[in-house]
Image (cartoon, rainbow, N blue to C red):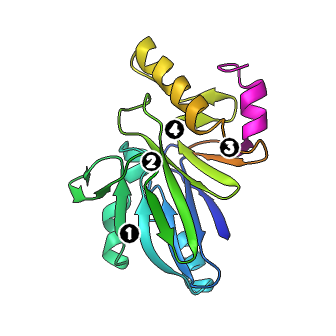
């Protein structure tokens, strides 16, 4: 798997490119902005961006969708069927996202917002703003916080402890570290 991380100036949001080395098909995870570095990476590695996966519809994860779609014939995947007025394929728990020969699996991670979703590939999980290194995403109520914690435990912490966690903001981590040392779970 080809995996690249891009830290943006939009609220220091992370964007990721996941690509299949055989087919050269690629998926962008979150779209804070139109970032020339990503375009250069796609061109340099001879990739075809075929999809944009949105973990949740806050501006710092969706602000670049329209500009990206102007340059790429890509399908948008999200937890609901519209992102910033753009039609999206709504995805739910255990739906598959195919990127060439790679298969991702959707995990629902509500709490930060109701339609938050993550994406699991072998050895990695993209958690958006549900789970960060050492923290969890902000919620509107204690009920939402409890829901977020429940779904992280149910869908992320069941993964291999060596599985890398790539959040919407901040550094990467692992399931082992977050399960054992994140103050919301330890």
Point out the tag, 2 or 4, that comes first from the N-terminus: 2
* Label 1 – label 4 distance at C-alpha: 21 Å
Which range of residues does the magenta coloring cover?
172-186
Between circles 1 and 2, the one closer to the viewer is 2
Relative to 155, is 34 above or below?
A: below
Check residue 181 for magenta coloring: yes
Instruction: Report which quarter residue 101 is drawn in.
Output: bottom right
* Label 3 – label 4 distance at C-alpha: 18 Å
Percent across and percent down for residue 39 are 51, 76
Dots 2 and 4: beta carbons under 8 Å? yes
Percent across and percent down for residue 22 are 63, 84
Point out the tag, 3 or 1, that comes first from the N-terminus: 1
Q: What residue is rendered at 52% in x and 30% in y?
A: 151
The residue beneath circle 4 is 129
Q: Which mark is residue 159?
A: 3
Check residue 71 for magenta coloring: no
Q: Using the image as rendered, state which of residue 121 and residue 52 is in the foreground.
A: 121
Q: Using the image as rendered, state which of residue 2 and residue 84 is in the foreground.
A: 2
* Label 3 – label 2 distance at C-alpha: 18 Å
């Amino acid at each position: 798997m080809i995996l690249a991380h891009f830290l943006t100036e939009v609220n220091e949001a992370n964007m990721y490119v996941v690509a299949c080395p055989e087919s050269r098909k690629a998926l962008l995870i979150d779209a804070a902005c139109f970032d020339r570095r990503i375009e250069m990476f796609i061109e340099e590695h001879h990739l075809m961006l075929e999809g944009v996966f949105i973990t949740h519809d806050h501006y710092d994860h969706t602000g670049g969708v329209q500009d990206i779609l102007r340059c790429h014939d890509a399908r948008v995947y999200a937890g609901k069927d519209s992102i910033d007025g753009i039609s999206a394929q709504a995805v739910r728990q255990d739906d598959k996202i195919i990127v060439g020969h790679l298969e991702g699996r959707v995990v629902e991670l509500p709490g930060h917002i109701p339609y938050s979703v993550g994406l699991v590939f072998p050895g990695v999980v993209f958690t958006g703003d549900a789970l960060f290194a050492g923290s969890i995403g902000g919620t509107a109520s204690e009920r939402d916080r409890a829901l977020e914690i429940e779904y992280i435990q149910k869908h992320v912490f069941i993964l291999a402890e060596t599985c890398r966690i790539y959040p919407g903001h901040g550094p990467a981590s692992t399931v082992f570290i977050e399960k054992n040392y994140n103050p919301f779970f330890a």
